[in-house]
Amino acid sequence: VKEAGRNNFHFYTGEMNAHALRWMSLEVHLRHAVERNELRLYFQPQVSLADGRVTGVEALLRWQSAELGMIPPGDFIPLAEDSGLILDIGTWVIEEACRQMKAWHAKGLPAMTVAVNVSARQFATGTVPAVVSKALRDNGVAPRWLEVELTESVMMHDSEHTQMQLNELSAMGVSISLDDFGTGYSSLGYLSRFRLDKLKIDQTFVKNITTDPRSAAIARATTALAHGLNLVVVAEGVETEGQLAFLRDMGCDKIQGYLFSRPLPVDELSVLLLEQRML
Ligand code: C2E
Ligand code: CA
Ligand code: CA
Ligand code: CA
């Protein structure tokens, strides 16, 4: 029994080492990614259903690694959070978004909001308002053009500390958007306690909205709830005309999804915005 136990143990650590090694080497690569300029922001338009125009974009992180190729955020953000690298990366995202806004303004593109995703780990440092205010100031960008997206996990985690930072961001004039609504540890208490401006209906509900009455009911109730609280409602992951019609009918304010556009590298987004301006 002892023998078997030992073998099992060896087998187990062998597996763990392989996993840890892969994780570690990815971490080493990720550590260099910022310095080597391998991170990029892609931008996905949000379209207002009232007039069909792009009113804002969400910045989504991409890692174009020289050695490993293109790595989607779902594959490295958990690692970045575990290793603490998310702090440098998160700061870079906020700064880069503001630099980009400055460049768009300089080109005379119509002003629009840029939403950035901020992780719970980043809020835990307590430095988000300072990082945001410096990035805005350095680039001469008015706070109302920046939007911070956070998930329910952020509010769950040390909620008093988070609440202070959100209040500070709000007071500055930055908008706060609640991402992935309904997928996490939703508590209606959060909606009353935190100053929010926008609520994003998660794509899992949108995906099934035309086929599953329960997803439809959740989306409908969420929209009513959000509107009752004066929040703008955005549906994400909109892929079909059917979903769009349903969401429009339901009173959703904005949509984001492949139906209108995938997340685009900055050059392609500029082309899209210039075309819109000429319409
Ligand atoms: P998220 O914030 O919920 O972002 C929405 C995700 O849905 C994005 O995936 C986007 O490309 C994808 N998406 C948009 N429209 C559609 C659609 O019509 N259909 C489908 N199937 N997917 C659609 P992406 O870019 O791979 O990002 C995944 C997640 O990684 C994000 O989910 C967010 O949680 C995280 N993330 C991305 N960028 C950042 C960042 O800068 N900082 C942090 N902390 N997290 C980030
Ligand atoms: Ca998001
Ligand atoms: Ca989301
Ligand atoms: Ca998500």
Image: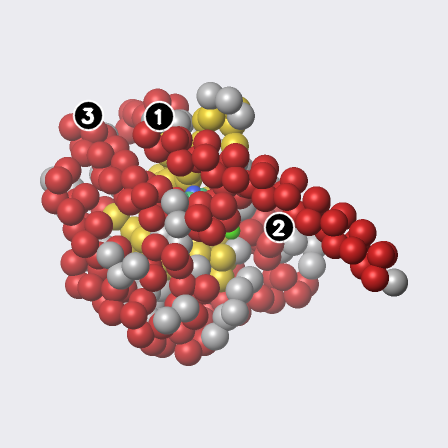
Residue 109, labelled with which disc? none
Mark 3 neighbour class, 10 Å CA radius: few under 14, some 14 to 19, many 20 or more: few
Query: Which residue corresponds to the image point at 83% horizontal and 62% vertical from the top-left?
Result: 2
Mark 3–mark 1 CB contact (< 8 Å): no
- Crowdedness of circle 2 by 10 Å Cα count: few (<14), some, many (20+)? some
Helix, strand or loop at label 3? It is: helix
Give the quarter of the figure containing the C terminus: top left
Q: Under tag 2, what secondary structure?
A: helix
Contact (Cβ within 8 Å) of mark 3 with mark 2: no
Q: Position of residue 63 (x, y in %)?
A: 45, 31
State yes or no: Cβ of the residue under disc 2 lies below 8 Å from any atom of ligand 1. Answer: yes
Check residue 36 in the rendering and tell me which mark sits there, or answer none: 1
Which of the marked residues, 3 or 2, is nearer the chain's N terminus? 3
Q: Judge depth for marks 3 and 1 and give the one in front.
A: 1
Which residue is label 3 attached to? 107
The answer to which of 164 and 254 lies nearer the viewer is 164
Q: Amino acid at mark 2?
A: Lys
Task: Write the residue at 30% across / 59% down.
Answer: 125
According to the picture, the residue beneath numbered tag 2 turns out to be: 207
Image quadrant where residue 269 sits: top left
- N-terminal label among 3 and 1: 1
Q: Disc 1 versus disc 2: distance between alpha carbons? A: 37 Å
Q: Earlier in the sequence, mark 1 or mark 2?
A: 1
Q: Nearer the viewer, residue 217 or 268?
A: 268
Q: Amino acid at mark 3?
A: Lys
Residue at 87%, 63% (x, y): give it: 1
Q: Residue at x 47, y 26 (%)?
A: 65
